[in-house]
């Protein structure tokens, strides 16, 4: 079990599989494998179930999450990936925004198991609706499958004065008639025009078709 050096000892690698240290030993969120080593319980982080894990698995090198980071997570769904982010940011806070009420109910249950996760029923295109929960955050992570994904990321980074951002761009949510490569380039253009610097851009295949993770930083 070895930590990935660029993640500040927050994500661990063992025989090609990623793990986070569980905040809640003995508790699974999505049926993930658990195992204990030297008194510490680890949760397997499946890249087929998490775009953030897929990004690391395919070789992504920029990981802005720290132990005490405050994270705004857009498109939290039922809380699968946010629960791993909460493991990583054990002394921080993960604000989990989800729009779909059915998924939000599952998200609330996940957040009940981790005190540093806060469920927020809200629309990611309207950051003013949930701005009362935090004055600022360190990282905005976006996994919202709809149009204008780059704009949504930048709007939220602006609203919460975030230093770093990550967006899992789903090309087919933007335009099914345009090539994924063109969609990704347009997302990068939007981000640069908003004054942010792109520090990484990784396709997520074979785990996610026509997806790319774009990592940005405020200059």
Image (cartoon, helix red, strand yellow):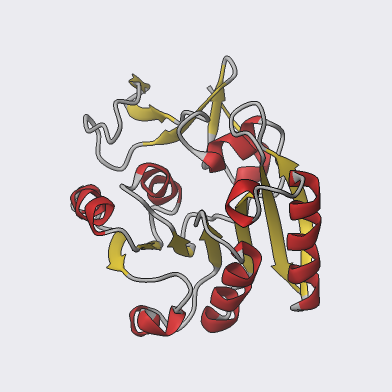
- Please state if 215 lies on the left or on the right of 144 as rendered: right
Residue plotted at (61% across, 66% down): 148
Above or below, comparing residue 124 to residue 167 in the picture = below
Left or right relative to 120: residue 113:
left
In the image, 197 versus 144, the foreground residue is: 144
From the top left corner, tell me how far across and down residue 149 is, in percent.
Answer: 60, 63
Q: Name the residue located 81 percent from the left edge and 56 percent from the top edge.
A: 185
| Residue 4 in view (yes/no) | no
Q: How many marks?
A: 0
Residue 6 x/y as whole percent: 67, 43
Q: Residue 75: tell me if it is visible.
A: yes
Task: Give the quarter of the figure containing the C terminus.
Answer: bottom right
Left or right for 162, reference 88 = right
* Residue drawn at x 18%, y 49% as measured from the top left: 109
* Residue that extends furthest to the front in the rendered view of this protein: 177
Percent of width and height locating residue 107: 26, 52
| Residue at the (50%, 28%) spot, across then down | 48
Q: Position of residue 80 (x, y in %)?
A: 37, 42
Tell which of 2 and 98 is nearer to you.
98
Residue 29 found in image quarter: top left
In the image, residue 108 sits, relative to residue 47, either above or below, namely: below
Residue 121 vs 49, above or below: the answer is below
């Amino acid at each position: 079990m070895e930590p990935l050096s660029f993640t500040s000892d927050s994500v661990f690698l063992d025989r090609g599989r990623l793990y986070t240290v569980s905040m809640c030993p003995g508790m699974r969120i999505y049926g993930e494998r658990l195992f204990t080593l030297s008194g510490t319980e680890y949760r397997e982080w499946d890249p087929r179930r998490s775009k953030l894990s897929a990004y690391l698995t395919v070789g992504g090198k920029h990981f802005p999450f720290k132990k005490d980071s405050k994270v705004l997570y857009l498109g939290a769904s039922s809380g699968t990936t946010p629960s791993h982010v909460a493991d990583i940011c054990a002394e921080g806070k993960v604000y989990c925004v989800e729009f779909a009420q059915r998924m939000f109910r599952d998200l609330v249950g996940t957040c009940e198991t981790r005190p540093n996760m806060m469920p927020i029923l809200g629309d990611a295109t309207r950051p003013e609706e949930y701005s009362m929960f935090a004055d600022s955050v360190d990282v905005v992570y976006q996994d919202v499958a709809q149009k204008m994904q780059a704009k949504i990321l930048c709007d939220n980074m602006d609203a919460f004065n975030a230093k770093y951002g990550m967006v899992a761009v789903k090309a087919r949510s933007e335009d099914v008639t345009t090539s994924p490569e063109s969609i990704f380039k347009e997302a990068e253009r939007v981000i640069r025009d908003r004054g942010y610097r792109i520090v990484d851009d990784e396709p997520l295949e074979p785990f996610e078709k026509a997806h790319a993770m774009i990592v940005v930083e405020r200059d």
